[in-house]
Image (spheres, helix red, strand yellow):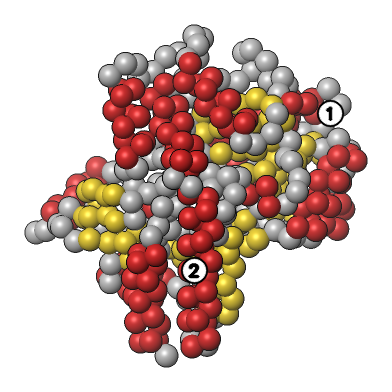
Amino acid sequence: MSKTDRVVKMYDEYVMNTYKRTSLCLEKAKGARVEDIDGREYLDFFPGWAVSGIGHCHPKVVAAIGRQSKKLLHVSNNFYSELQALLAKTIIGNSFPGKVFFCNSGAEANEAAIKLARRYGHDSGRFEIITCFKSFHGRTLATITATGQDKVKQGFEPLPEGFRHVPFNDIEAVSEAIGNKTVAVMLELIQCEGGMNIADVGYVKALRKLCDDKDILLILDEVQTGMGRTGKIFCYQHYGITPDVMTLAKTLGGGVPIGAMVARAKFQDVLTPGSHASTFGGSPIVSAAALAVFEAIKKERLLRNANRMGAALREKLEGLKKRYHFIKEIRSKALTIGVELSIKGDDIVKQCTASGLLINCAQDTVLRIMPPLTVKKKELDAAIEILDKIFARIT
Ligand SMILES: *Cc1c(COP(=O)(O)O)cnc(C)c1O
C-alpha cells in the first residue's frame, strides 16, 4: 500500500465525504511546484483554487508567519491589533476610500456584504439582491441562494428569501429585475466557477450607472479575481468604475484563511457595534501573512509578471487552438485563463494530473488554468508541452 492509499483509507473512514477528490496527497510545495507524499512532483497551475495565488509557501509569507507566531497568534476583536489596522490601510490604499471588515473565508465575506446591503435597505423596506446565473458566491445558506446554479441548492430548501437571478452580461435583464425591494446587485467580473465568463466593459459601466441612479449597491465578489490574478491588483480596476462593496479571500492570505469585505466611504458605517462579528477575523497571524502577500506583489513586481506570463501563455494556447479543432475559445485576463472545448474536459484534467500538471475544469467543458503570479517562463513551456501531448492523443 502506498502512503497515498493509506491516507485515502483514513479519509474513507473518518473524513466526511463532501468533495470529489483526486487520489493525490500533497505533502510539500514551493512556488508552482508541489510534491506528493509518495515523492511524485507536479506543476501546480491551479494552486488551491487560487488560494496560493503568489505560489505555495512564498518566502515572505512563510517568514511573516514565523515571526508573528513567536509574538501573538490571536486577539479578540474587542481589542486592537496593529497588524489588522495596517492590513485594512493597505487594502484601502490599493483600492478605494472606505473601511474593511475581516472574516475567514469568501462565503463569510459575501455574507457580510449581504448583511451590510440588507441593513442599508432596512429603513426603506428593501432587501432583494440580484445576482447572475452561473455565479458562485459560497456554500453558506445565504451564499448558495445568491449563487446562480441549482446544483448547489438542491436538498437545502427552504432557502432564505430575497435573491433574484438574471443572465450575465445582460443589462436589460438587470434593469427589468430591479423593483422597489431591490437593494443590491452582486457580481463576479469573471465568473470562474461559471466557466471563465468575462464581464463586458459596457455592461459593467451601465450597471454602475443603473445602481447609482436607483441607490442600489454594486457588490463585486473579487474572492477569486482579486489580488493580482487578472494583471491589476483588483479586477474592477480594468473597468473604470468603483464598486460600493468588494469581497476578498483566497490569495489575500497567501495560504492561510482570511476573508475581507471592503465598503466604500458612503457605506462604511452601515454596520455598527453588535451588528456583525467574527471571532477569528483579521487575527495577527493571518494579517501578518496578508501584509506579506501585498509586499510580495509590490516588491517582486508580480503584476508585471502576471501580465507578461499571461500574455505568453495566451499566445501558446492560441497556437494550440490553431492545431486542435476541439479548442473553441480562449478567454483570459492575465493569469486567469479559460480554454473552452467542444468536448468534455474531465478526462483531460485526469491525464494532466497523471503527466504531472494540475489544472481544473469548470462547467464540464472549460479548462481552468490559473498559475501563480510568480510563475516562470520555463514552467509555462513545460505545461504547454504536457497539454500538447495530451491533445495530440485526442485527435
Ligand atoms: C471560492 C469563492 C467563494 C467562496 O469562498 P470560500 O472561501 O470557499 O467560502 C466565493 N466567491 C467566489 C467568486 C469564489 O471563487
Q: Is mark 2 within 8 Å of ligand 1?
A: no
The first of marks 1 and 2 along the sequence is 1
Residue at coordinates 39% horizontally, 80% vertically from top-left? 388
Which image quadrant is residue 263 in? top right
Q: Is residue 337 above or below residue 229?
A: below
Residue at coordinates 73% horizontally, 52% vertically from top-left? 239
Pointer 1 local density, CA inside 10 Å: few below 14, some 14–19, many at least 20: some
Disc 1 residue type?
Answer: Gly
Q: For this view, does 39 lie left or right of residue 34?
A: left
Q: Residue 125 — which label?
A: 1
Disc 2 residue type?
Answer: Ala
Looking at this view, is 59 or 27 the one in front? 59
Assign the N terminus to one quadrant of the image: bottom left
Q: Is mark 1 within 8 Å of ligand 1?
A: no
Q: Is residue 114 visible?
A: no
Residue at coordinates 68% horizontally, 20% vertically from top-left? 271
Q: In terms of secondary structure, where does tag 1 sit? A: loop
Residue at coordinates 49% horizontally, 9% vertically from top-left? 79
Q: Is residue 320 above or below residue 43?
A: below
Assign the C terminus to one quadrant of the image: bottom left
Distance of label 1 from label 2 (alpha carbons): 51 Å
Looking at this view, is 66 or 136 the one in front? 66
Looking at this view, is 242 or 214 the one in front? 242
Q: Is residue 230 visible?
A: yes
Q: Residue 159 — which label?
A: none
Q: Is residue 284 above or below residue 314?
A: above
Q: Residue 312 — which label?
A: 2
Q: In terms of secondary structure, where does tag 2 sit? A: helix
Q: Position of residue 274 (x, y in %)?
A: 62, 13
